[in-house]
Image (cartoon, rainbow, N blue to C red):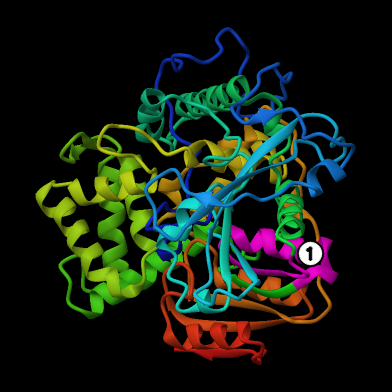
Amino acid sequence: MITGCTGGPHDGGARGPKETHRGSPTVAMPGTPKGKDYPSARSTGRPIERIPSVRPQGLVDPPPGKGMAAYTHQTVDWQPCPTKSAQTKQCATVLAPLDYDHPGRQAVTLVLARRPSATSESKRALFTNPGGPGASGVDFLDSFNDHGLHRSYDLVSWDARGTGRSTPVECFTDREMERYVAADYSPDNQSEVQQLINLNTDFGRACLAHSGKLLEHISTEDTVRDLELLRRLLDQRRLNYFGFSYGTSIGAMYATLFPQKVGRMVLDGATSIGGTPTVSQTYGFNRTLGNFAAWCAQHGCRLGGSKEEVEQTISDFLRRLDHDTIPGGRRDLTQALATSGLTFALYSAQSSWPTVLRGLEKAIYTDNGTSLLAWADAYYQRNRDGQFGQFNAAFPAIRCLDERDRGVAGELAEWHREAGRATAFGPFVGPDLTCATWPVRTTGDTGRKISYVGKPAVLILGTTGDPATPYEYAEHMHQALKSSRLITLEGNGHLAFDQSSCVQAKVLDYFAGNTPEDSRCG
């Protein structure tokens, strides 16, 4: 199952949905624990392991003082950011409890950034999170097109715990990641299933070996409590917030835990937090691929004369790559990398589909996989030197702490169900074995009920052809947060705000103090 929901225009052109359940080589990865038992295809629960005594970067002693008062009395000292960024961006560092139940123990480091308001006298902050989980909010502020929101607000974001410059999760080396993302992750037989289990188990063990107890304290609720701490430190009476994709999970849980502190809140690309999804994310990508195929056929493309023919051409190509890779420039294009590249491409708005078509035609008819490989590299934040972004560690670590434990057997059964329902895309995605083999117990945060009744109403944005956060999730969140409004964008691609001037006008009007009724934008 594909999981995760970042990327698109609100992540600096970053990742797709992150299928971290990568395939498996026939030998164990270097640098990971050896000689331990692996789960089997019949395993019904995670292989929980002892937490090692390691101290990740940024895990420090708490600030002076007792309990939470030691944290709420911190001063936020804004300074020019040390890395290349917009000249107006400022950064600061604060501490938060590793474990909010025991604030006197160790602390995590949180790095935050702001773009000051164009109106110097403004004291209002608008927090934003770009999604993931695990995308860097500090980097996000450099690329975020706020369409004028900075005139009234200081725009503030942060690297959530486990992410980026804030106490980061660490897992595989770049060399290990190279093999991890390129291997076959849609198993065809029991031997390949076990190889996939072994590799994902090695990945989780590497994360545990490098990150230790941090893996127990990077849940969505932990991040929400960090956000409440940041609200207090910036002296904001209420939280004004704009969350994208997974950032909507943070917003929805904040509204559930701190309803009296909710200010203006917009949630774009709602997740399925707090309920049982009526459709899966795999189904969402399959639906968007079908929309692309129908568009392609209507425009007389080379891939086929009907939606079904186009889908079949793409499926046949991906199936061929299972045995015969093609050149991708710097390295060969495997089935896994092609699937990741196509996934990344489907994040884009429909206006980008001609570019997607050219990349597919080049790969299918000329055995030139450079476009798909470039999209796969963008998906994994892989640069030309073979270095992978830290997001590849943060995403699974946060997600697996949140998600319920169905074990390997449950995930394999779910994959077979989804492959039968999402026939054009599902077979190539593979089972989600990252969390099924994760060595840390789940908190179950994604299954927690969400609710909100209060003023102002929360504004939810949903796109009918969104692949990563299917529109049904926005409808669910709208129903769960009773005091909310739903703005529907009729279109394709992930997220609504950047795609539509109609949506932008409603959002800007909402942040100006008005609350629209449920409505649709074309």
Q: Residue furthest right?
A: 66
- Rendered view: 281 above or below 503: above
- Rendered view: 365 above or below 52: below
Which quadrant, please, contains the C terminus? bottom left
Q: On the image, which quarter does residue 293 sit in?
A: bottom left
Residue under the point 37% across and 55% down: 344
Q: In this rendering, would 259 be left or right of 349?
A: right
Q: Position of residue 464 (x, y in %)?
A: 50, 77
Q: Residue furthest top?
A: 35
Q: Residue furthest front?
A: 121
Q: In this rendering, would 443 be left or right of 439?
A: right
Q: In this rendering, would 458 be left or right of 290?
A: right
- Rendered view: 39 above or below 411: above
Q: Position of residue 185 (x, y in %)?
A: 43, 36
Q: Is residue 306 visible?
A: no
Residue under the point 67% across and 24% down: 212
Q: Position of residue 223 (x, y in %)?
A: 70, 49
Residue under the point 86% across and 44% down: 68
Total number of numbered labels? Answer: 1
Of 167 and 130, the residue lying toward us? 167
Residue under the point 29% across and 75% down: 351
Mark 1, secondary structure of its residue: loop
Q: Pointer 1: what residue?
A: 450
Of 454 and 178, the residue lying toward us? 454
Callout 1, which amino acid? Answer: Ile
Q: Position of residue 271 (x, y in %)?
A: 62, 62
Q: Is residue 134 visible?
A: yes
Q: Would residue 430 be counted in the magenta stretch?
A: no
The residue stretch that appears in magenta: 236-262
